[in-house]
Image (tube, grey):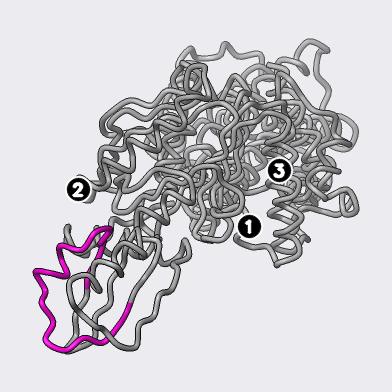
Amino acid sequence: MAGTLALTKAELTRLLHNRRYFIFTVAFPVILYLLIGRQVNTKAYGIGFGAYYMIAMSTFGAFSGALNGNAQRISQEKKEGWIRQLRLTPLPASAYVVTKVLVSLATTIPAIVIVLLLGRFYGNVHLPAWEWPVIAVVVWFGSTIFAALAVAIGYRFAPEQVQPVTLIIYFIFAILGGLWFPLSGFLGHVGQFTPTYEAVKIGSDVIGNLSVPVGLPIGLVVWLGIFATLATLAVRSTAESV
Amino acid sequence: MSQYETVTATASGSWRGSGGPPVVSFENVSKHYGRLKAVDGLTLDLHPGETTALLGPNGAGKSTSLDMLLALRKPTGGKIEMFGSDPYHAVKSGRVGAMLQSGGLMPEVTVRDLVELVTKLHPKPEPVATTLKRAGIAQFADQRVDRLSGGQTQRVRFALAICGKSELIVLDEPTAAMDVETRRLFWNSMKEEVAAGRTLLFATHYLEEADQAADRILVINRGRLLADGTPAEIKARAGARRISFRLERVDEPFLLGLPGLVNLEVRHDIVQLQTSDSDATLYAILDGGYRPSEIEVTSLGLEQAFLAITAEDDATNGTTHAGETN
């Protein structure tokens, strides 16, 4: 466990020096919120637009941070042999993946906190005190499940393939999940099954004082199961080529 | 085949004296990729304190064997033990330090940060300053890992292999990216590790390295062990000397019966033969009533010995090489 923590600490230090990560996870959602977030008299998902967009943008930042950074890094580190090098140390075999997920859990936090603060002080979103941590946790869980998908992609694809693959997934889950704008009609119907939609909808139902349909949290757990299975299969099947 | 067995027997005889259970043992280990036999029934023991070179051409199965020893690949058949346990648990116990050709480094950090990190992963760490000094990387410890030259990178990899107090060090082509001077420094520091009682196993295709650094050489080709002995024994095994001369009316059956003969080639009136005892071979030719001309006796280096051993094996078993996968 001490080894896993040492590696996690080293990974976090590396990340602090990485500008790309901040652009994807923090800068994009903050800029979008500043441009679009403050619309008075507009409603989405039954709540004020500013509140909806606050949840959507924090989910967007956190989810793209979990997906983009990790997949690329894992694939690169696999290609360069760093994963192989770690397998020669006393660090347990699972520690590398555990570390990547732990780092993801930590790195999605700034995007969530910053966008929520922006919603409160720029978007004038007023909520009862208890709702803030609930929303933060929902967004955090809904986005960090993508860390598992990033592991699957990083192990499966070569670095030059990772970029297009993550980009496609990124657009699908951002648009269908209603992160950039609320969807209606057919796409809105299909989008209801995405984890990004589920996370945003749970958050907006909490704000709208609606009872959260039990299908939404169950949906998130199912997605976690799917992504974790894909990750496990990818790690296992590439064990001899890493 | 019988000759290989003879040499193997003498060689293992001389190693049995080192005492204690083997550090590493391969028992009939194979690794097949479909029909390709990368490693084919390898059996060997490494004993504490030995420096052993694994010598073989590209595709001989050296890297695959080391990968299996280090639990990176699973054997198709047979059994590998290290320190009396399976390879995975032996590696995780920190009793082995390894450096592979394919091992990479974490980018974006300094050399010192990286060595500190890997040192922390060890149950019995060496002080970081000691490792930096031993690996000869102290002077560029504050540089970023991704901005080093090939030789410097190789030395950092070496540092990661020795940053714990491991009993066995495994190196795959350790000096591949090094210049002559760095290579010399490397072997000097390696000798210190061995003097401190560590067991060393390294794969190489630099024959002079195997000759100078190793107590014992394992020659492998096409996934099989061909010879096992001290550098001197390996040279003797291949026929330590080559005799060549001209002789009219060559009597091949007579030549094939010469004492010490290992290999014979006759082209017209030119005879070339390899022998493990050049004196006896030559006297027998003269005693047989022959008067060859232009006699030359040359001693074979390890390189020729190695080539002779593998060429003989290829001739007996076809020439397709098993692919070496990294």
Q: Secondary structure at mark 2?
A: loop
Q: Residue at x 20, y 47 (%)?
A: B34
User: Does residue B292 appear left or right of residue B227 in this picture?
Assistant: left
Q: Identify the disc placed on residue B1.
A: 2
Q: Secondary structure at mark 3?
A: helix
Which dot, 2 or 3, sits closer to the camera? 2
**What is the distance, in whole Å, between disc 1 and disc 2 at their CAs?**
33 Å
Disc number lying in front (1 or 2): 2
Above or below: residue B88 compared with residue B174: above
- Residue B260 among magenta residues: yes
The residue type indicated by label 3 comes to Lys
Classed neighbour count for the residue bearing mark 3: other residues with Cα under 10 Å, few (<14), some (14–19), many (≥20):
some
- Give, as a three-letter code, the residue at label 2: Met
Expressed as whole percent of the image width and height from the top left, the position of residue A107 reads 74, 34
Q: Which residue is mark 1?
A: B175
Compared across the picture, whether B108 is left or right of B258 comes to right
Q: CA distance from mark 3 to mark 1?
A: 14 Å
What chain does mark 1 sit on? B
Q: Residue at x 63, y 57 (%)?
A: B175
Counting from the top left corner in percent of width and height, residue A149 is at 50, 36
For mark 3, name the chain: B
Q: Chain of mark 2?
A: B
Which stretch appears magenta? Answer: B244-264
- Please give the label number shown on residue B191: 3
**Earlier along the polypeptide chain: callout 3 or callout 1?**
1
Secondary structure at numbered mark 1: loop
Q: Residue at x 69, y 19 (%)?
A: A137
